[in-house]
Image (tube, rainbow, N blue to C red):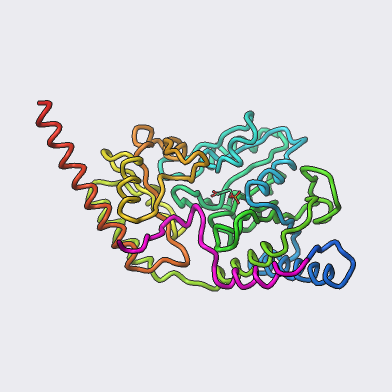
Protein backbone atom coordinates (compact mmCIF):
# COMPACT_ATOMS: atom_id res chain seq x y z
CA UNK A 1 0.00 0.00 0.00
CA UNK A 2 1.15 3.56 -0.71
CA UNK A 3 2.57 5.55 2.18
CA UNK A 4 -0.10 7.30 4.25
CA UNK A 5 -0.86 10.83 3.12
CA UNK A 6 -1.06 13.36 5.95
CA UNK A 7 -3.52 16.19 5.33
CA UNK A 8 -4.37 17.15 8.91
CA UNK A 9 -1.86 19.93 9.63
CA UNK A 10 -4.50 22.02 11.39
CA UNK A 11 -4.53 19.29 14.08
CA UNK A 12 -0.75 19.02 14.31
CA UNK A 13 2.15 19.30 11.90
CA UNK A 14 5.23 17.05 11.79
CA UNK A 15 8.44 18.52 13.20
CA UNK A 16 10.22 20.65 10.60
CA UNK A 17 13.88 19.75 9.93
CA UNK A 18 15.05 23.17 11.23
CA UNK A 19 13.04 22.69 14.41
CA UNK A 20 14.37 19.17 14.90
CA UNK A 21 17.94 20.44 14.49
CA UNK A 22 17.35 23.23 17.01
CA UNK A 23 15.68 20.84 19.44
CA UNK A 24 18.58 18.34 19.22
CA UNK A 25 21.14 21.11 19.72
CA UNK A 26 19.53 22.00 23.05
CA UNK A 27 18.23 18.75 24.51
CA UNK A 28 21.57 17.03 25.11
CA UNK A 29 22.70 19.75 27.48
CA UNK A 30 21.45 20.38 31.02
CA UNK A 31 20.03 23.82 30.31
CA UNK A 32 18.12 25.49 33.12
CA UNK A 33 17.84 29.18 32.34
CA UNK A 34 17.63 30.00 36.07
CA UNK A 35 21.01 28.43 36.93
CA UNK A 36 23.84 30.90 37.43
CA UNK A 37 26.65 28.66 36.09
CA UNK A 38 27.87 28.74 32.49
CA UNK A 39 25.43 26.10 31.21
CA UNK A 40 22.55 27.96 32.84
CA UNK A 41 23.69 31.20 31.23
CA UNK A 42 23.95 29.38 27.91
CA UNK A 43 20.35 28.20 28.39
CA UNK A 44 19.22 31.72 29.26
CA UNK A 45 20.93 33.08 26.12
CA UNK A 46 19.15 30.48 23.93
CA UNK A 47 15.85 31.29 25.60
CA UNK A 48 16.19 35.04 25.05
CA UNK A 49 17.42 34.57 21.49
CA UNK A 50 14.32 32.47 20.74
CA UNK A 51 12.04 35.04 22.39
CA UNK A 52 13.49 37.88 20.31
CA UNK A 53 13.41 35.86 17.08
CA UNK A 54 9.77 34.90 17.59
CA UNK A 55 8.75 38.49 18.35
CA UNK A 56 10.69 39.70 15.30
CA UNK A 57 9.05 37.11 13.02
CA UNK A 58 5.63 38.11 14.33
CA UNK A 59 6.43 41.84 13.91
CA UNK A 60 5.72 42.21 17.64
CA UNK A 61 9.12 43.47 18.84
CA UNK A 62 8.62 45.55 22.00
CA UNK A 63 5.83 43.30 23.32
CA UNK A 64 6.28 40.77 26.15
CA UNK A 65 6.35 37.09 25.27
CA UNK A 66 5.65 34.48 27.93
CA UNK A 67 6.39 30.85 27.03
CA UNK A 68 3.71 28.34 27.97
CA UNK A 69 2.92 24.65 27.49
CA UNK A 70 0.84 25.41 24.41
CA UNK A 71 -2.02 27.56 23.22
CA UNK A 72 -4.52 26.06 25.66
CA UNK A 73 -2.44 27.44 28.51
CA UNK A 74 -1.75 30.69 26.64
CA UNK A 75 -5.51 31.19 26.22
CA UNK A 76 -6.06 30.39 29.91
CA UNK A 77 -3.36 32.91 30.88
CA UNK A 78 -4.98 35.54 28.67
CA UNK A 79 -8.40 34.83 30.18
CA UNK A 80 -6.92 35.21 33.67
CA UNK A 81 -6.43 38.87 32.72
CA UNK A 82 -10.21 39.18 32.28
CA UNK A 83 -10.66 39.08 36.06
CA UNK A 84 -12.22 42.35 37.15
CA UNK A 85 -13.76 43.07 33.74
CA UNK A 86 -17.55 43.60 33.65
CA UNK A 87 -18.21 41.77 30.42
CA UNK A 88 -16.46 38.87 28.63
CA UNK A 89 -17.27 38.33 24.95
CA UNK A 90 -16.27 35.27 22.91
CA UNK A 91 -16.71 34.69 19.18
CA UNK A 92 -19.18 31.85 18.56
CA UNK A 93 -16.58 29.76 16.74
CA UNK A 94 -13.71 30.01 19.23
CA UNK A 95 -11.67 26.92 20.08
CA UNK A 96 -12.89 25.01 23.15
CA UNK A 97 -9.90 26.24 25.17
CA UNK A 98 -11.51 29.69 25.01
CA UNK A 99 -15.16 28.82 24.49
CA UNK A 100 -15.49 26.57 27.54
CA UNK A 101 -13.42 28.79 29.83
CA UNK A 102 -16.17 31.18 30.96
CA UNK A 103 -19.71 29.79 31.09
CA UNK A 104 -21.11 33.31 31.50
CA UNK A 105 -19.40 34.87 28.49
CA UNK A 106 -21.54 36.72 25.97
CA UNK A 107 -21.33 34.91 22.61
CA UNK A 108 -20.78 37.04 19.54
CA UNK A 109 -22.64 35.35 16.65
CA UNK A 110 -21.22 34.63 13.20
CA UNK A 111 -23.02 34.59 9.85
CA UNK A 112 -23.21 31.63 7.47
CA UNK A 113 -19.67 32.36 6.26
CA UNK A 114 -18.28 32.31 9.79
CA UNK A 115 -17.76 36.11 9.84
CA UNK A 116 -18.36 37.82 13.17
CA UNK A 117 -21.43 40.05 13.40
CA UNK A 118 -19.62 43.36 13.86
CA UNK A 119 -22.79 45.40 14.42
CA UNK A 120 -23.56 43.13 17.39
CA UNK A 121 -20.01 43.68 18.66
CA UNK A 122 -20.35 47.45 18.32
CA UNK A 123 -23.57 47.48 20.33
CA UNK A 124 -22.03 45.21 23.02
CA UNK A 125 -19.03 47.53 23.26
CA UNK A 126 -21.23 50.61 23.49
CA UNK A 127 -22.95 49.57 26.73
CA UNK A 128 -20.30 51.29 28.85
CA UNK A 129 -19.06 48.05 30.47
CA UNK A 130 -15.36 47.25 30.77
CA UNK A 131 -15.01 44.49 28.18
CA UNK A 132 -12.64 41.62 27.43
CA UNK A 133 -13.07 40.10 23.96
CA UNK A 134 -11.57 36.88 22.56
CA UNK A 135 -11.63 36.41 18.78
CA UNK A 136 -9.46 33.94 16.87
CA UNK A 137 -7.39 35.06 13.85
CA UNK A 138 -8.41 32.02 11.76
CA UNK A 139 -10.92 29.36 12.60
CA UNK A 140 -9.38 25.92 13.11
CA UNK A 141 -12.29 24.08 11.42
CA UNK A 142 -13.04 26.29 8.41
CA UNK A 143 -10.01 28.58 8.07
CA UNK A 144 -12.31 31.66 8.17
CA UNK A 145 -10.13 34.70 8.82
CA UNK A 146 -11.34 37.37 11.25
CA UNK A 147 -10.83 41.05 10.53
CA UNK A 148 -8.61 41.47 13.58
CA UNK A 149 -7.32 44.87 12.54
CA UNK A 150 -10.84 46.31 12.38
CA UNK A 151 -12.06 44.50 15.50
CA UNK A 152 -8.96 45.76 17.31
CA UNK A 153 -9.74 49.34 16.31
CA UNK A 154 -13.26 48.97 17.69
CA UNK A 155 -11.87 47.52 20.91
CA UNK A 156 -9.32 50.33 21.28
CA UNK A 157 -12.00 52.96 20.74
CA UNK A 158 -13.96 51.41 23.64
CA UNK A 159 -10.90 50.67 25.80
CA UNK A 160 -11.67 46.96 25.61
CA UNK A 161 -9.03 44.19 25.79
CA UNK A 162 -8.78 42.15 22.58
CA UNK A 163 -7.30 38.67 22.94
CA UNK A 164 -6.50 36.83 19.70
CA UNK A 165 -6.05 33.07 19.50
CA UNK A 166 -3.63 33.12 16.55
CA UNK A 167 -2.82 29.41 16.49
CA UNK A 168 -3.97 28.82 12.91
CA UNK A 169 -2.76 32.14 11.49
CA UNK A 170 -0.03 33.75 13.59
CA UNK A 171 1.37 36.44 11.25
CA UNK A 172 0.18 39.99 10.62
CA UNK A 173 -1.81 40.46 13.84
CA UNK A 174 -2.29 44.13 14.70
CA UNK A 175 -4.26 45.99 17.38
CA UNK A 176 -4.39 43.04 19.79
CA UNK A 177 -3.74 43.22 23.53
CA UNK A 178 -2.71 39.58 23.72
CA UNK A 179 -1.98 36.81 21.22
CA UNK A 180 -1.91 33.03 21.87
CA UNK A 181 0.39 30.77 19.84
CA UNK A 182 1.10 27.05 19.59
CA UNK A 183 4.35 25.54 18.27
CA UNK A 184 3.06 22.20 17.03
CA UNK A 185 0.71 23.70 14.43
CA UNK A 186 3.74 25.28 12.74
CA UNK A 187 6.14 22.34 12.74
CA UNK A 188 7.50 22.82 16.25
CA UNK A 189 7.02 20.31 19.02
CA UNK A 190 3.83 19.66 21.00
CA UNK A 191 3.58 21.07 24.51
CA UNK A 192 5.06 24.50 23.67
CA UNK A 193 3.33 27.81 23.05
CA UNK A 194 3.38 31.45 24.03
CA UNK A 195 1.32 34.43 25.00
CA UNK A 196 2.41 37.75 23.49
CA UNK A 197 1.09 40.83 25.27
CA UNK A 198 1.70 44.53 25.63
CA UNK A 199 0.59 44.43 29.30
CA UNK A 200 2.02 43.08 32.53
CA UNK A 201 0.32 39.74 33.16
CA UNK A 202 -1.21 38.23 36.30
CA UNK A 203 0.05 34.62 36.60
CA UNK A 204 -2.18 31.54 36.63
CA UNK A 205 -0.12 30.04 39.46
CA UNK A 206 2.78 30.93 41.74
CA UNK A 207 6.18 29.27 41.99
CA UNK A 208 9.66 30.18 40.72
CA UNK A 209 9.95 33.61 39.17
CA UNK A 210 10.44 32.36 35.61
CA UNK A 211 9.04 34.37 32.70
CA UNK A 212 9.07 37.60 34.75
CA UNK A 213 6.83 35.93 37.33
CA UNK A 214 4.02 35.44 34.79
CA UNK A 215 4.56 31.69 34.33
CA UNK A 216 6.35 29.74 37.04
CA UNK A 217 8.08 26.51 36.00
CA UNK A 218 11.40 25.64 34.37
CA UNK A 219 11.31 26.67 30.73
CA UNK A 220 11.30 23.93 28.07
CA UNK A 221 14.37 25.29 26.29
CA UNK A 222 14.67 22.54 23.66
CA UNK A 223 10.98 22.94 22.79
CA UNK A 224 11.27 26.72 22.74
CA UNK A 225 14.27 26.87 20.39
CA UNK A 226 12.47 24.39 18.12
CA UNK A 227 9.38 26.63 18.24
CA UNK A 228 11.46 29.63 17.20
CA UNK A 229 13.07 27.67 14.33
CA UNK A 230 9.68 26.36 13.17
CA UNK A 231 8.06 29.78 13.21
CA UNK A 232 10.99 31.29 11.33
CA UNK A 233 10.82 28.53 8.68
CA UNK A 234 7.04 29.03 8.41
CA UNK A 235 7.55 32.77 7.92
CA UNK A 236 10.03 32.19 5.08
CA UNK A 237 8.09 29.42 3.37
CA UNK A 238 5.61 29.74 0.53
CA UNK A 239 2.80 27.46 -0.60
CA UNK A 240 3.03 25.89 -4.05
CA UNK A 241 -0.21 23.86 -3.85
CA UNK A 242 -2.87 26.55 -3.63
CA UNK A 243 -4.04 26.14 -7.24
CA UNK A 244 -4.26 22.36 -6.79
CA UNK A 245 -6.38 22.89 -3.67
CA UNK A 246 -8.69 25.36 -5.44
CA UNK A 247 -9.17 22.90 -8.28
CA UNK A 248 -10.29 20.22 -5.82
CA UNK A 249 -12.67 22.69 -4.16
CA UNK A 250 -14.47 23.25 -7.44
CA UNK A 251 -14.70 19.48 -8.05
CA UNK A 252 -16.22 18.98 -4.61
CA UNK A 253 -18.75 21.69 -5.41
CA UNK A 254 -19.66 19.86 -8.62
CA UNK A 255 -20.30 16.81 -6.43
CA UNK A 256 -22.86 18.80 -4.43
CA UNK A 257 -20.62 19.77 -1.50
CA UNK A 258 -20.57 23.19 0.16
CA UNK A 259 -17.16 24.67 0.92
CA UNK A 260 -17.37 26.34 4.32
CA UNK A 261 -16.44 30.04 4.53
CA UNK A 262 -15.80 30.12 0.77
CA UNK A 263 -17.13 33.66 0.36
CA UNK A 264 -14.69 35.26 2.80
CA UNK A 265 -10.89 35.34 3.15
CA UNK A 266 -9.62 32.03 4.55
CA UNK A 267 -6.34 30.71 5.91
CA UNK A 268 -4.96 28.94 2.83
CA UNK A 269 -4.10 25.64 4.53
CA UNK A 270 -7.66 24.65 5.51
CA UNK A 271 -10.41 23.21 3.31
CA UNK A 272 -13.64 22.28 5.12
CA UNK A 273 -16.75 21.09 3.33
CA UNK A 274 -20.10 19.48 4.02
CA UNK A 275 -22.17 17.27 1.77
CA UNK A 276 -25.85 16.53 2.33
CA UNK A 277 -25.53 12.74 2.44
CA UNK A 278 -22.33 11.20 3.74
CA UNK A 279 -21.56 11.47 7.48
CA UNK A 280 -18.18 12.62 8.79
CA UNK A 281 -17.71 9.31 10.55
CA UNK A 282 -18.19 7.22 7.38
CA UNK A 283 -16.05 9.58 5.33
CA UNK A 284 -13.27 9.40 7.90
CA UNK A 285 -13.38 5.60 8.00
CA UNK A 286 -13.18 5.43 4.23
CA UNK A 287 -10.32 7.93 4.02
CA UNK A 288 -8.40 6.25 6.81
CA UNK A 289 -8.72 2.81 5.21
CA UNK A 290 -7.40 4.35 1.98
CA UNK A 291 -4.38 5.82 3.80
CA UNK A 292 -5.34 9.50 3.81
CA UNK A 293 -5.35 11.26 7.20
CA UNK A 294 -7.95 14.05 7.38
CA UNK A 295 -10.37 15.05 10.11
CA UNK A 296 -13.98 15.86 10.79
CA UNK A 297 -13.35 19.37 12.12
CA UNK A 298 -11.37 19.97 15.25
CA UNK A 299 -9.28 17.15 16.71
CA UNK A 300 -11.25 15.76 19.62
CA UNK A 301 -9.41 14.42 22.67
CA UNK A 302 -11.76 11.44 23.01
CA UNK A 303 -11.06 10.35 19.44
CA UNK A 304 -14.80 10.37 18.79
CA UNK A 305 -16.44 12.16 15.87
CA UNK A 306 -18.74 14.85 17.22
CA UNK A 307 -21.08 17.20 15.38
CA UNK A 308 -19.26 20.44 14.65
CA UNK A 309 -20.21 23.31 17.00
CA UNK A 310 -18.65 25.67 14.45
CA UNK A 311 -20.82 24.41 11.57
CA UNK A 312 -23.86 24.76 13.84
CA UNK A 313 -22.93 28.35 14.75
CA UNK A 314 -22.78 29.07 11.01
CA UNK A 315 -26.32 27.76 10.56
CA UNK A 316 -25.43 24.32 9.13
CA UNK A 317 -27.35 22.65 11.96
CA UNK A 318 -28.56 19.67 9.90
CA UNK A 319 -25.16 19.10 8.26
CA UNK A 320 -22.94 19.56 11.32
CA UNK A 321 -22.32 15.79 11.37
CA UNK A 322 -21.12 15.74 7.75
CA UNK A 323 -18.12 18.10 7.85
CA UNK A 324 -14.73 17.02 6.53
CA UNK A 325 -11.59 19.11 7.09
CA UNK A 326 -8.52 18.67 4.91
CA UNK A 327 -5.51 20.74 5.89
CA UNK A 328 -2.16 21.10 4.17
CA UNK A 329 1.18 22.18 5.57
CA UNK A 330 4.91 22.14 5.02
CA UNK A 331 5.02 18.49 3.87
CA UNK A 332 2.16 18.91 1.36
CA UNK A 333 2.77 18.62 -2.41
CA UNK A 334 0.39 19.81 -5.16
CA UNK A 335 -0.44 16.22 -6.22
CA UNK A 336 -1.59 15.35 -2.69
CA UNK A 337 -4.87 17.20 -3.26
CA UNK A 338 -5.68 15.04 -6.28
CA UNK A 339 -4.86 11.88 -4.33
CA UNK A 340 -7.19 13.03 -1.57
CA UNK A 341 -9.97 13.79 -4.04
CA UNK A 342 -9.65 10.55 -6.04
CA UNK A 343 -10.04 8.50 -2.88
CA UNK A 344 -12.87 10.65 -1.57
CA UNK A 345 -14.76 10.45 -4.89
CA UNK A 346 -14.37 6.66 -5.03
CA UNK A 347 -15.92 6.35 -1.58
CA UNK A 348 -18.66 8.87 -2.32
CA UNK A 349 -19.75 7.04 -5.47
CA UNK A 350 -19.77 3.71 -3.62
CA UNK A 351 -21.77 5.32 -0.82
CA UNK A 352 -24.34 6.74 -3.27
CA UNK A 353 -24.61 3.37 -5.02
CA UNK A 354 -25.25 1.58 -1.68
CA UNK A 355 -27.81 4.22 -0.78
CA UNK A 356 -29.67 3.78 -4.04
CA UNK A 357 -29.69 -0.05 -3.69
CA UNK A 358 -31.09 0.15 -0.16
CA UNK A 359 -33.73 2.66 -1.34
CA UNK A 360 -34.80 0.19 -4.08
CA UNK A 361 -34.91 -2.70 -1.58
CA UNK A 362 -37.06 -0.80 0.89
CA UNK A 363 -39.35 0.69 -1.83
N1 LIG B 1 -6.63 27.27 19.56
C1 LIG B 1 -6.79 26.78 18.32
C2 LIG B 1 -7.45 27.63 17.28
C3 LIG B 1 -6.37 25.49 18.02
O1 LIG B 1 -6.53 24.99 16.77
C4 LIG B 1 -5.75 24.72 19.03
C5 LIG B 1 -5.35 23.31 18.78
O2 LIG B 1 -6.13 22.50 18.36
C6 LIG B 1 -5.58 25.28 20.30
C7 LIG B 1 -6.04 26.56 20.52
C8 LIG B 1 -4.91 24.52 21.41
O3 LIG B 1 -3.51 24.47 21.17
P1 LIG B 1 -2.55 23.51 22.00
O4 LIG B 1 -2.67 22.16 21.40
O5 LIG B 1 -1.17 24.09 21.81
O6 LIG B 1 -2.96 23.57 23.42
Q: Which residues are magenta?
A: 1-30
Q: Nearer the viewer, residue 241 or 289?
A: 289
Tell me if residue 5 is in the magenta stretch.
yes
Q: Is residue 270 above or below residue 91?
A: below
Determine the residue positioned at 90% across, 66% down. Answer: 36
In the image, taking residue 257 as reference, residue 159 lies left or right, namely right
Question: Residue 336 appears in which quarter of the rendering?
Answer: bottom left
Residue shown at 67%/66% (left/top)? 54
Q: Residue at x 51, y 55 (%)?
A: 12
Instruction: Give the x, y percent position of residue 266.
Output: 45, 55
Q: Position of residue 34 (x, y in %)?
A: 85, 61
Left or right: 325 as drawn, with respect to 214: left
| 192 or 40, nearer to the observer | 40
Task: Determine which quarter of the picture holds residue 335.
Answer: bottom left
Is 297 located above or below residue 267 in the figure? above
Residue closer to the observer: 274 or 330: 330
Residue found farthest to the top: 363
Residue displayed at 60% across by 32% down: 106
- Residue 293 sits above or below residue 356 on the image: below
How far across and down, in percent of the image, does residue 73 sit?
67, 47
Residue furthest right in the image: 36
Q: Residue 328, image x and y in percent? A: 43, 60
- Residue 330 belongs to magenta span: no
Amino acid sequence: MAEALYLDHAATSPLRPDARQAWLSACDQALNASSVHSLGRNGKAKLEEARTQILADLDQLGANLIFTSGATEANALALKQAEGFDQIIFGATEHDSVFLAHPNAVILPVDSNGSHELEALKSLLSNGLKSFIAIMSANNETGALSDISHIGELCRAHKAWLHVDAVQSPFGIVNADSIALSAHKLGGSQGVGALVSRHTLKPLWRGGGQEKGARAGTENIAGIVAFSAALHAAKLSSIDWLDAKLEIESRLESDGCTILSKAIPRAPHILAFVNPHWSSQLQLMHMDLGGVCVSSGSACSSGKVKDSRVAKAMGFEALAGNILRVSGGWTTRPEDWQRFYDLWKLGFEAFLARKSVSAQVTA
